[in-house]
Image (spheres, grey):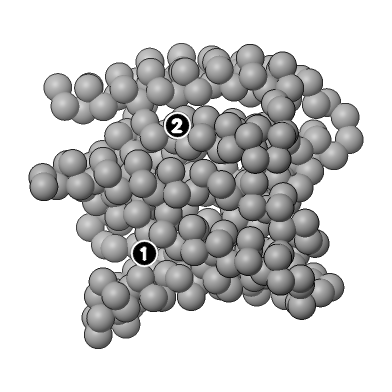
Amino acid sequence: MSAHLKGMLMAFLGVFILTPDGVLIRLADADSWSIIFWRGFFFAIGVLIILLMTSGSKAVDEFKQIGKDGIFIGILTGLGSVTFVFSIQHTTIASTLIIVSIMPMMIAVISWLILREKSGIFTWISMVIVVIGIYIVMSGETKGSNLYGNLLAFLSVTLGATGFTLIRKNKNISMIPAMGINGLVQSVVALVFIEAVILSFDAMIYIFAMGVMQALSFSLITSAGRYIPATEVGMFMPLGAIFGIVAGWLIISEEPSSSALIGGFIVLLTLFIHSWYSNNLDKG
């Protein structure tokens, strides 16, 4: 198997595995801080197991190699996971996933700010169209907790994009250990606010599944960036949003609003075209 195909499969599987995440958060039917605590705990344990299976005795060395940037990546993506859970709890799964799917665009903006990477005119035009699409998504939910949830989703994608920009900066270093820090950050932050550590058996099963999926998904997506360009990884983000929205619709009968469908179509189509165009540009 070529390195390129390996990276493509990693990116696809990473995005696909995370598809039921929003649905599981709803099914857990528990306090947000309790979900975040156990979700982060199982996530961290899952990453540790993956590291031990793939690196064995070198796992400690891999933790040492991530440096300050790796720790910062773990903190940023961990806080992004916290805000993601609260977003799912305060707005529709569709709205959250559509907003979070703009990750590739946010990475382009933050890379411009932090790494001074220049983006072409096509990227900036795509950003304008995406902003219009997000506005349409949010226009149907301009009051109450739904708007709050949408803003949390935007904060989540901003934090996550900053973390993944730093992963791009350190692409020669495996940042899988940073995902373990991500899980620890979730648990430590939740521990400050948590009211109930003991949850029902059903809730714990759903949260355990979340942690396992996060560990596999983030490890695969983080590793994929070492084999293929970030633009190719970005091509799978719209698919993840579509899979997640369909899962919410089929499993818990959460039908997206008309504004979410219209705005989401604009956002996801624009993201896919941009990623496809950027990927072909990179190859050329």
Query: Is 265 left or right of 223, judged from the image as shown?
Result: right
Which residue shows up at 55% across the image and 17% down it? 265
Please name the amino acid that badge 2 sits on. Answer: Leu
Residue 234, horizontal then vertical, whole percent: 38, 35
Residue in the foreground of this view, choosing between 207 and 134: 207
Query: Is 281 left or right of 211, judged from the image as shown?
Result: left
Does 153 sit above or below residue 264? below
Which residue shows up at 57% across the image and 59% down it? 210
Does 64 sit above or below residue 35? below
Residue 96, horizontal then vertical, whole percent: 65, 37
Instruction: Determine the image quadrant of residue 264.
Output: top right
Indicate the secondary structure of the residue bearing disc 1. helix
Instruction: Determine the image quadrant of residue 99.
Output: top right
Residue in the foreground of this view, choosing between 267 and 203: 203
Which residue shows up at 76% across the image and 47% down it? 89
Please name the amino acid that badge 1 sits on. Answer: Ile
Which quadrant would the C terminus be assigned to in this image?
A: top left
Does 16 sit above or below residue 109? below
Check disc 1: other Cα within 10 Å, few if <14, some if 14-19, many if 20+.
Answer: many
Residue in the foreground of this view, choosing between 272 and 251: 251
